[in-house]
């Protein structure tokens, strides 16, 4: 095998609660499972559970650990927590089937009258007099010892002193949020208010904007499940230029462990207000307006576990200025609805942004500072994914990512794109300088700007993966004692995948980088193939470039699914 480069390794914290950040989990499946289990009248079983062909169970059933084998009828809802479910020919469930932390095997001739909801990740919980109390809180939170674990997302609370930590990075170190928060559900909706100060731990620590910031927001929801959402936000934060390629957890661990920060950052100071509609936890559409002051921020000196004596990759300067923003944002997440072939299995995150203001164009590699100039631009972005279960234990999943300028002036640097490293085209290393081929990953040149920021006006990426459950059960080795495997799925899966994509400038640029209208020739796209094993919260993959034969094999460790 040719030279192997490890992009994300040493996953020492992969089984901790940080791994839960990799994909925000819709509350419906987890809460439905917990509510059914804890409800009076539910038959609760810990261990294997069978319903023979001639038997009918006339109430809800909740099974922990399992496995569950159904040949007869369940008149209520069946909940399986950290358990695999097999529905045999003739089995019938008259209400819903909810599976958390397990797989479903479904033979022909099975009837489920309600919805089928699945969640791949295990549920970590404690027991309180026979009731389940989930151990996981909101992503990224560090809870003081007096904060109750397992607090429901719909429960009211008042925290006069609350701590939360965000993603570790080379500009802020570990940004810590401190302040009060308040939530009250009502008969007509919900009110939520938060007011946090932001303390950045990267050296040098001073009494200035480099160390201190703030973020305050208020949400008013009208409607318990469906309805309107009115929001307002004031902020002075450091934000990533792009975050779609890697999750917050993966980016933070790569920075903290390996001193490899795979994002760029800029300062945002201003306000925004939004009004939107939502359909449960699955669909939301909102219109957002605001005004922001942008600034460049430099890399600082945060501590890293390894390679602490090395220097950080430069955080490039961006286009400072004040810009008024208006955007429309759409989010659809029906990945749990595996029973509805067209409505279910979708994840779509899209937005269109229009900005107008005055910015100072970045000096770039020559250090020439230009005077402020008026700018008006329109930018679009979409991340669309389709999840298809083609047989029990087998999935064929597709993803398309596209973004770029839709008109107006050229995009400010912090609103441009890049496509490189894990999460995009895995067969190519992260922002490696290539002196032979046109750089269609960052749209830079051999004398590119410090830190190699993304300079592409547009990008397009397609990904496909085939996922098959291996059928290996960890419990067979450890007699059902799963204390050692937090965050691991009971049944790992092998994955085969392919990526193809590129970025480009429009309408001009270095030969091979610039392109006019439409999509560049498909022959100019970079492609790679890969294979690996997904253990639920950890996946290990080998990826090889197809379009560039001399590219070495990459070894990639991901926390959770690739997408």
Image: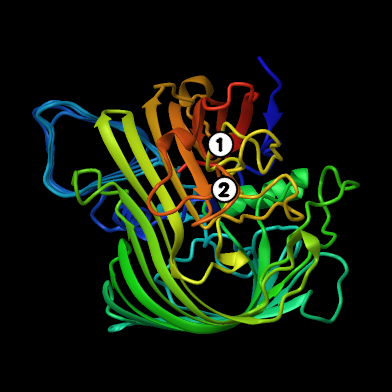
| Residue where numbered disc 2 is placed | 19
Q: Is residue 13 above or below residue 428?
A: below
Could you tell whether 195 is left or right of 451 in the image?
A: left
Whether the residues at callouts 1 and 2 have beta carbons within 8 Å, the answer is: yes
Q: Residue furthest top?
A: 1
Disc marking residue 100: none
Determine the secondary structure under disc 2: helix
Q: Position of residue 239 (x, y in %)?
A: 62, 67
Query: In this view of the protein, can residue 492 be seen by the observer?
Result: no
In percent of the image, x 45 and y 57: which residue is there? 403
Could you tell whether 446 is left or right of 554 in the image?
A: right
Query: In this view of the protein, can residue 383 be seen by the observer?
Result: yes
Comparing 478 with 41, the one in front is: 478
Determine the secondary structure under disc 1: loop
Task: Give the CA separation, mark 1 to mark 2.
Answer: 9 Å
| Residue where numbered disc 1 is placed | 538
- Whichever of callouts 1 and 2 sits on the residue coming sooner in the sequence is 2
The colour scheme of the drawn protein is: rainbow
Q: Position of residue 65 (x, y in %)?
A: 40, 36
Q: Is residue 284 above or below residue 170?
A: below
Could you tell whether 547 is left or right of 312 in the image?
A: left
Residue 289, by quadrant, is: bottom left
Q: Position of residue 522 (x, y in %)?
A: 41, 36
In percent of the image, x 52 and y 27: which residue is there? 547
Residue 107, by quadrant, is: top left
In percent of the image, x 68 and y 17: which residue is there? 2
Q: Position of residue 175 (x, y in %)?
A: 71, 67
Comparing 165 with 421, the one in front is: 421
Could you tell whether 207 is left or right of 142 in the image?
A: right
């Amino acid at each position: 095998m040719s030279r192997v480069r490890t992009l994300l390794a040493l996953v020492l914290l992969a089984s901790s609660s940080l791994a839960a950040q990799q994909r925000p989990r819709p509350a419906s499946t987890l809460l439905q499972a917990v509510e059914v289990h804890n409800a009076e009248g539910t038959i609760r079983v810990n261990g294997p559970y069978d319903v023979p062909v001639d038997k009918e169970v006339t109430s809800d059933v909740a099974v922990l650990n399992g496995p569950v084998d159904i040949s007869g009828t369940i008149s209520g809802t069946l909940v399986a927590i950290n358990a695999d479910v097999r529905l045999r020919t003739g089995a019938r469930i008259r209400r819903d089937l909810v599976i958390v932390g397990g797989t479903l095997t479904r033979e022909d001739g099975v009837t489920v009258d309600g919805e089928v909801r699945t969640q791949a990740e295990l549920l970590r919980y404690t027991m309180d007099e026979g009731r389940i109390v989930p151990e996981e809180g909101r992503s990224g939170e560090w809870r003081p010892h007096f904060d109750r674990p397992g607090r429901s997302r719909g429960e009211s609370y008042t925290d006069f002193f609350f701590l939360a930590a965000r993603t570790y990075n080379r500009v802020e170190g570990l940004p810590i949020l401190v302040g009060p928060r308040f939530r009250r559900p009502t008969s007509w909706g919900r009110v939520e208010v938060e007011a946090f100060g932001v303390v950045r731990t990267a050296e040098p620590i001073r009494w200035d904007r480099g160390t201190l910031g703030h973020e305050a927001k208020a949400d008013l929801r009208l409607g318990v499940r469906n309805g309107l959402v009115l929001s307002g936000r004031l902020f002075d934060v450091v934000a990533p230029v792009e975050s779609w390629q890697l999750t917050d957890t993966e980016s933070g661990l790569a920075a903290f462990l390996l001193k490899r920060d795979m994002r760029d950052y800029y300062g945002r100071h201003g306000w925004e207000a939004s009004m939107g509609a939502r359909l449960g936890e699955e669909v939301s559409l909102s219109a957002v307006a605001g005004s922001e002051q942008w600034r460049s921020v430099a890399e600082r000196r945060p501590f890293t576990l390894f390679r602490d004596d090395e220097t950080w990759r430069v955080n490039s300067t961006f286009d400072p200025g004040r810009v008024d923003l208006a955007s429309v944002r759409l989010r659809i997440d029906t990945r749990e609805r595996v029973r509805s072939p067209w409505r279910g299995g979708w994840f779509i995150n899209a937005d269109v942004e229009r900005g107008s203001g005055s910015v100072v164009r970045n000096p770039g590699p020559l250090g020439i500072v230009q005077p402020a100039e008026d700018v008006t631009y329109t930018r679009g972005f979409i991340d669309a994914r389709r999840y298809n279960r083609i047989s029990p234990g087998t999935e064929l999943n597709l993803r398309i990512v596209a973004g770029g300028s839709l008109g107006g002036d050229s995009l400010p640097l912090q609103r441009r794109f890049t496509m490189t490293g894990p999460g995009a085209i895995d067969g190519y290393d992260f922002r490696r300088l290539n002196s032979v081929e046109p750089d269609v990953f960052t749209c830079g040149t051999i004398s590119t700007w410090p830190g190699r920021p993304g300079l592409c006006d547009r990008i397009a990426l397609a990904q496909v993966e085939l996922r098959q459950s291996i059928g290996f059960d960890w419990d067979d080795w450890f007699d059902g004692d799963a204390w050692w495997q937090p965050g691991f799925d009971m049944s790992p899966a092998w994955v085969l995948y392919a990526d193809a994509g590129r970025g480009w400038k429009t309408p001009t640029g270095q030969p091979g980088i610039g392109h006019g209208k439409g999509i560049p020739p498909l022959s100019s796209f970079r492609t790679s193939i890969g294979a690996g094993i997904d253990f639920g919260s950890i996946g290990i993959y080998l990826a090889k470039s197809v379009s560039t034969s001399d590219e070495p094999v990459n070894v990639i460790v991901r926390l959770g699914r690739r997408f």
